[in-house]
Image: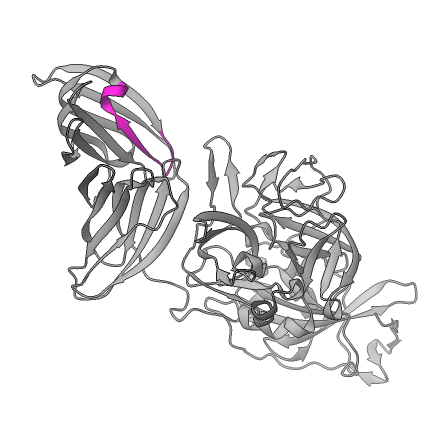
Amino acid sequence: MKNRLLHVLAGKLVVGGLLFFHVTWGWAAALPEAVPWPQLGVRLAEKRVAMLDLPVIDCPLGLADEKPDHLVIQVIENTLYEWKEYEFFTADGEVRLALEMIRPEARRLRADEAQILLNASRLVEIDNDYAQGAQAESQFSRTGIIGQDDLIKVTDTTGFPWHTIAFIDAFWEPTAEWYSYSGFMISPYAVVTTAWALYDFDVKTWYRNFVVIPGAYYNQGEQRTEAPFGRISNCNKAVSSAFHDTGKSEYSYGVLLLKERFPGIDTFMALEFDYEPTRLNYAGYPGYVKGAKSWDMWGMGGHVLGYEGLNNRLMKTDIDITNGGYGGPLYIYNSTTKARRVVAVSIWNNNHPNYNSGARLVSANKALFTDWLQYVPPSGGSGPAYDNYSYVPYLSNDGAAGRWTGLALTNRNGQVNQVKVEYFSRAGLLLNSETKEIAANGQTSFAAQVPAASEGWIKLSSTEPLQGLALVGQSRPESMFDMDLKTTLHSRLKLAHLAADAGSWNSLVMICNPNDSPATITYKAYNTGGGLVATRSGGLAARGSVQTNLYTLFGQALAGSMIIEATQPITAFLLYDSKTTVWKAGLSAIPVQ
């Protein structure tokens, strides 16, 4: 920081004897649906952003040879901004800021323009980070608790900037396991995280099948993770070349480049380069809190303990960061501008007992981050229109029985069909997702890519109508059956045949609930004469499924038919099998008005 002293001469600000003057507006290229710089003030008024009177001045001439006190890059209303801030001091020691804009146009800002930019940067007034909240007690194998655990839960993740901080799931193929990490969106299509979340340097292997959920929080009542802005798994991945080549922590920057965007998120946390603060804040998704698994966002404030690594690129801090939380932003709260600014990416530090670490944002990696900030997918980010839906109510990958599930899909259209396949567990958790492309009038078949011992159901979203079936086979004993794709959902279904007893026959009902709300399922068993024999009810999780043995459910032999009623539209399938042979037959549930 330079001790620049303000002087006022005849009502005009001068530095080095040079007068300030104004320049005209200009236009610059921006991201899709961007609000251009000349309209930013109008947009703030439309959004009713409370404008603070920040301590800014007209930017004077004579600063070309001065090093700025702050170098900031930020996407605001889908437009990329970059600016320098110079600190001046009045005679009584108060700070005043002068701003020089670099993007979207090169210009020195008047005080009124600087007010607009800085108020847009912060969006809301912040008094202090993590001033209140209960303390957490955390235990985990990769623990980063320094002294007492002081993590505090973020109770509203849907506002700025919390809705730009993301829960990330990643599949590790060598062990067929899922791992969670944290990240933060820096633009509509770029989610920054630690490089270790994307690429394991030790074994030279990439993670895959990423799922990004910004602003995720756990719904305790419904026992599920909520995605207020949706989930995106259609993305590319990248890490810094220095990390890929050396694996050194100071280069642990990675990014997920999305091929589509989250609706309703258009301003992102500012990035500040080369800043060396004394205090920090953090937010992310630690894997365990209070001794239990957590899917919620937590944060805390702390101190910078020092620097290490090449050119001090590693920042040491006493902030508590544990597995799952790595990749979240380490940021400052600027008391002058009332804004949060990311200064480092939190990384794992091999369980060091005295500090945690962050990979700093520095001039050497500014070009890399700028490239990520400007990334726009070839489609412009709109992505394919996946507006055709199909469902398979049963999925199984049981290694003990040698059981697998496959899909055979055909495209009877004269254009390419893009297909997104999502695999859900019985509890409604996304197990994996993948995309397929089927040529015009073409066909494809493939095995479901899910972790071992998974059971659940499948949702297919496609750009054109889709036909096909699912095959479920097993080797112990050898058998196979198929299920047609279901393209409609209903709240009342009929099973035309039942045979369930203690000796020869099983009737297994598979039901899936693709909705975001749980359902109550009522089973009504009728005898061959049409008389109601018995009724049973049960719950079904949002986006969940169930496999029900009817003999076990009713506790008696059944013969006849069944009506299934649900409080949410569902689809169902009955697997009819012989207990004494390997005979299996599938019966589709019939919609009933």
Tell me residue 321's x, y (percent): 66, 48
Q: Position of residue 84 (x, y in %)?
A: 71, 73
Residue lying furthest left in this view? 529
Residue appearing at x 86%, y 85% in the figure? 17
- Quadrant, the N terminus: bottom right
In the image, residue 254 sits, relative to residue 21, either above or below, namely above
Q: Which quarter of the picture shows residue 91?
A: bottom right
Quadrant housing residue 486: top left
Give the residue at x 41% y 41%. Answer: 429
Left or right of residue 306, residue 411 in this image: left
The image position of residue 187, as x and y in percent, is 53, 63
Q: Is residue 277 visible?
A: no
Q: Which residues are magenta?
A: 540-553
Residue 134 placement, left or right of 561: right
* Residue 359 located within the stretch drawn in magenta: no
Residue at horizontal 59 percent and vertical 39 percent from the top? 288
